[in-house]
Amino acid sequence: MASCVPSSTLFRRLLLVLQLAVAALTTLGAQAQLQYGYYNETCPGVEDLVRDALLAKFADDVTLPAGLLRLHFHDCFGAGCDATIMLKSHNGTAQRDADPNSTVRGYEAIEDVKAKVEAACPLVVSCADIMAMAARDAVNYTK
């Protein structure tokens, strides 16, 4: 006969797990944060470039902001917010090819914006930062 964990014990365990998760996220969040204006010296105007490129895309597809936010979430859910979801593989083993990511969209928008940023500031702005800016701008667009 199977025994059940009393609900108060289960609740306390769940609460402990949540507290540990919040503590871990707080510690990790303090180490790496996106900062507005970070590229002011090395790539002036990149924030405006990303926003303007996205606004043109949002005008063509009003569902794209939600797609970009979801794309960023799925990237962060894997191994961290490192843009590895953008990588393609020939044998279907990339994060992009995983089942949970099969319906994620917005890859082309990020690739287009990345090309514009590269034309303005070659090898300066990371794809991960462009994805974070895109998610931020997508949320701001929908306000």
Image: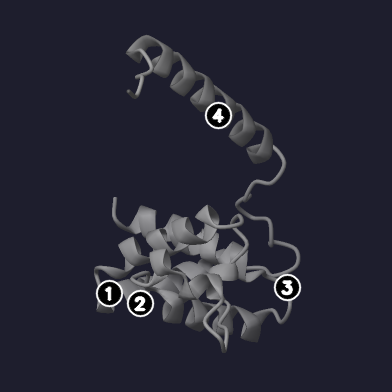
Query: Which residue was labeled with disc 4?
Result: 22
Query: Which residue was labeled with disc 3?
Result: 124
Label 1 to label 2, Cα distance in Å?
Answer: 5 Å
- Kind of residue at badge 2: Ala
Neighbor class of circle 4 (other Cα within 10 Å; few <14, some 14-19, many 20+) is few
- Which of the two residues, 128 or 133, is positioned nearer the viewer here? 128
Q: Residue at x 49, y 26 (%)?
A: 18
Neighbor class of circle 3 (other Cα within 10 Å; few <14, some 14-19, many 20+) is few
Left or right of 122 in this view: 13: left
Secondary structure of the residue carrying tag 1 is: helix
Query: Mark 3 against mark 2, which lies toward the viewer?
Result: 3
The answer to whether 107 is drawn above or below residue 141 in the figure is: below
Secondary structure of the residue carrying tag 3 is: loop
Label 2 to label 4, Cα distance in Å?
Answer: 37 Å
The tag earlier along the polypeptide, 4 or 1, is 4
Q: Residue at x 33, y 58 (%)?
A: 141
The tag earlier along the polypeptide, 2 or 4, is 4
* Residue 46 in sight: no
Assess whether mark 2 and mark 3 are in contact (beta carbons under 8 angstroms): no
Query: Mark 4 against mark 3, which lies toward the viewer?
Result: 4
Label 4 to label 3, Cα distance in Å?
Answer: 32 Å
Q: Position of residue 127 (x, y in %)?
A: 61, 71
Q: Position of residue 143 (x, y in %)?
A: 29, 50
Query: Which residue was labeled with disc 1?
Result: 59
- Which of the two residues, 103 or 53, is positioned nearer the viewer here? 103
The tag earlier along the polypeptide, 3 or 1, is 1
The tag earlier along the polypeptide, 4 or 3, is 4
- The colour scheme applied to this rendered structure is one colour
Query: Mark 4 against mark 1, which lies toward the viewer?
Result: 4
> On residue 56, which mark appears?
2
